[in-house]
Structure formats: C-alpha cells, structure tokens
Image (cartoon, grey):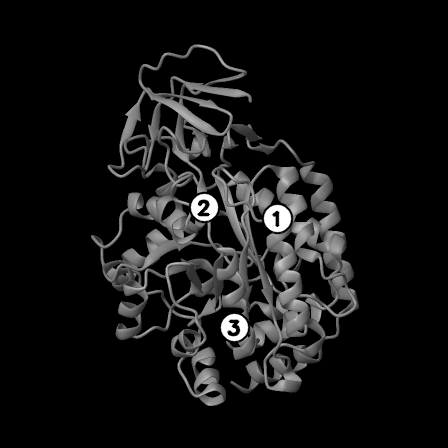
Amino acid sequence: MSTLLIKNAKSIVTMDGERRRIEGGSLYADGQKIIAMGKDIPYEDADTVIDASHKIVYPGLINTHHHLYQTLTRNIPFAQDCTLFDWLITLYEIWRHMRPEDVYISAAVGLGELLKSGCTTAADHFYCFPNGISGELIDEEIRAAGELGIRFFPTRGSMSLGRSKGGLPPDEVCQSEDVILKDTQRVIERYHNKERFAMVRVGVAPCSPFSVTADLLRESANLARSYGVRLHTHLAETIDEEDFCLEKLGARPLDFLEQNGWMGEDVWFAHGIHFNEGEIHRLGAHRCGIAHCPTSNMKISSGVFPIMNMLKAGVKVGLGVDGSASNDGSNMLQEARTAYLLHKLMHGPLSISAEDSLHLATMGSASVLGWEDDIGSLEVGKAADLFMIDTRQLGFAGALFDDTALPIVTGLSQSVDMTVVGGKVVVKEGRLVGLDEEKIALQAQAAAFRMMSEASFRTKIDYSQRRIAK
C-alpha cells in the first residue's frame, strides 16, 4: 500500500466530535487509513509528500443525493421555469433517448465536478431505463466513478408505474417489476462491498410514490434488507406529490411508504419538505435520514426544508446537490453555502452557522449514508478522504480569520486546490487527475445535442400557453 504525508498545513479542520482544529498540523495515511494526525507526528517521509503550507485541510464532503445522468440536460430553456411535475414531463421526453455511453459521460462530468468542489463520496439515484436500451446502465456510472477515484454509493432506482397505469412517467422509461428486482439483485451481488473503506456500496431506490407501485416498494424493501443494504427514495418534495398520494393512494406520502415497509434507520429520503410535525417526530424516532437539497428545492420552488425541526427531532440530515437538471451544477461547497444562507434567512441569524453547514456536508451526510465509521471527519482510523484549499487565492484575501467557515462564506469563485480519496490524489492544482476535462466536456455536449435532437416536445407549446394565460 502507498503512504501519504500532508505536512505543515495552515490548519486541519477535523469535524470530529469536538470539531477540533489543528493549527500547523500534519497527517499521515497508510493506504486508505489515517495513521497519525497532529502538530508533531513521527513521520517525515512517504510515497507522496505534500507541503501544505498556506493550505487548509478539510474532511471530504459527502453528497447524499444526485441524478448524474441529468448533467446532459441542464440549462434547457423550457425546463427552467416550471414546477416539478411539468419539469419531469418535459425532461422524460429527452431522457428516453439516453444510451449507455451517455450514462458514462454524464457520470464522468458530474462526478468530476463534485471532486473539484471537495466532494469525496457521492450517492446517486439512477432510475431512468429507456425501452430497448441495455438494463445495465448503472454499471456505466460505476465504471466512471472507478476511473475518477471517487467513493461511490449508487442506488439502483426504478419506475414501474407508467402513465397507462396512472403514474406520471411515460411507459417508455418504465420497467416491469420482475426486471427491476432481478437487476437490482444483480447490482447488489456484483458491486456492493460492506467492508471498511469500500469504494462502492449499493442501495435500493424505487423512484417516488407517483412512479412505482406499492408491490414494488414492498418487494424492494424486502430485497434490500435480505442483503443488508440501504433504502432510498424521493418523498414529500412538493404539494403536487402530496395531492397525488391523497387522491390516487388514499394516504399521505409518509403513511404510504410506512405501510409498505419504508421506515427505519436504513432508510433515507430525498427532500422531505412537506412533512407535518407528527411525521417529523416519527422520522426521528425511527432514525431515518434526509438528503437536503436546497438549491434544487429553491429552483423548482418546492419549498423550504424544515431543518431546525428535523434536527431537534433527531432526524439524520445531510446535503445533496440533486440532479444537475434541477441544480445546473454539482458543487458541494456551493450547496453547503446555499444551505447556510437559506436557513439563516428562514430561521434567524443564530439558527445555523457556517460550521454547522460544513458539518451537514460531512458528518451529517456520513450518518445519512450509514458510513460514519469510515468517512465524514478526519480522525486516526478513518479514511484519508479530504480536500485542501490554498489560502493565497484572491477570493480569500482579507478573509483568513476563521478557517472552518472560510470555504462556506467566501472564495466560491475558486476551485478546490487538491482532493484526496482514500489516500490518493484525484484533484491536483484544481484539475482532475484521472480525466481529460476538455475532451469529456466536448463529448458530453455532443451527447446532449443528440438527445435533444431526437426528442419530441409537444409540452413546449403547452407551457408557453400556460405562462401567457397567467
């Protein structure tokens, strides 16, 4: 195994239980594992030695919810100013033309962006499987993650309730439940690694109450628990979803999920905006997790996540960028900043600090993914997952008074200087080590143009008329 020595850092922000900060600290890792950390450690050499003078070291950020394939459908003009259901109906028409190579390219772009923003672990929710295309699309994302060197938590999503059965998505992007369950089992058996410092863990993730059946929810929960893997889905994102569940299913979204086995510390939901007070307490009592996606929620006008009530009730809360088509970027530092500013606005100046927001993106997210023993903080015995920023950047001038708050409150025009995953440098001087950025960007845009040209947009006229009418 290779060794890594980071020495003489301006500071190491640990985000451990005491949120310690080590001024002038050094860190030594053997393989993926941190062996020593402090101001004076008994190591002077390693296979890789990094002089971190003028740099601050932070634990790697953890993204708890994404749709990587959506990096090919961002900044679509007629999907910018609409509610979630209209947004989905528009984009389904593009996503149905997705090919395996598109999935690889989109994952490379999205994961690359995440690494460049200090993210070292990413969960993804892949649920769109167009008819006539290989069912092994999630494999392309895992391949991209392996080449980039990011720690990856793909969740095998699914949609089985097409429009012909009363659901929202077109039948062309849905699968039968037998196909879904068989391929989910294949993905778990082939890729899930439950060992410490695993680079890939797998979850089971039917898409949402308006795109899957109750049978699929129950069978997915049973399958996941038989293998000891986690469960994930969208829930309580919009009022439209709540209305759909009440009208079509006769229950509120959380009640419907709980009736079908979706409650427990192995479950995390994306968004979780429209829970009532009693539901929030139930979530906390069962130690469920929530992936909070503030940028996406603001853009789609879904509402504001009740973070203070969630944390008070004991709900595990982490951060997610959500799909690039509802965020238009994959920047975890920006997501942490957005959460910080949004909740100060909503809950007052003393409600959340920049340090709290960094904690959400590190230990909070690690807890949501059930991975807190390995990642989320810099401590002896944990993984050497970290990022560094160079304090000599112009955007940090006049701001070097609080190292913990620094990347949340200022300097966001700058790239992370270096990102390390499992002791290996994957971003150096702000550039990806394992990917030709310009080449993949050109390939991604070509794929996006092709998908757009193959799509049909009957809904474009409808949206235009609707806005004029208003």
For the residue carrying disc 1, how many other residues have a C-alpha within 10 Å: few (<14), some (14-19), or many (20+)?
some
Q: Which residue is mark 2?
A: 62
Q: Are marks 3 and 1 in contact (CB under 8 Å)?
A: no
Q: Where is residue 431 shown, x and y percent of the image?
A: 59, 33
What SS does tag 1 mark? helix
The quarter of the picture where the N terminus appears is top right
Residue sitting nearer the eye, 46 or 265: 265
Count numbered badges in the picture: 3
What SS does tag 2 mark? strand
- Residue 445 is left or right of residue 214, and the answer is right
Q: Amino acid at mark 3?
A: Leu
Which residue lies most toward the front here? 226
Q: Which comes before the other along the chain, label 1 or label 2?
A: 2
> Do we see residue 210 in this rendering?
no
Q: Which comes before the other along the chain, label 2 or label 3?
A: 2
> What separation in Å lies between label 3 and label 1 (alpha carbons)?
22 Å
- Residue 318 is left or right of residue 402, and the answer is right
Q: Amino acid at mark 2?
A: Ile
Q: Residue at x 39, y 60 (%)?
A: 290
- The answer to whether residue 152 is above or below residue 127 is above
Q: Amino acid at mark 1?
A: Tyr
- The answer to whether residue 112 is above or below residue 426 is below
Q: Where is residue 69 shown, x and y percent of the image?
A: 64, 57
What SS does tag 3 mark? helix
Q: Which residue is mark 1?
A: 191
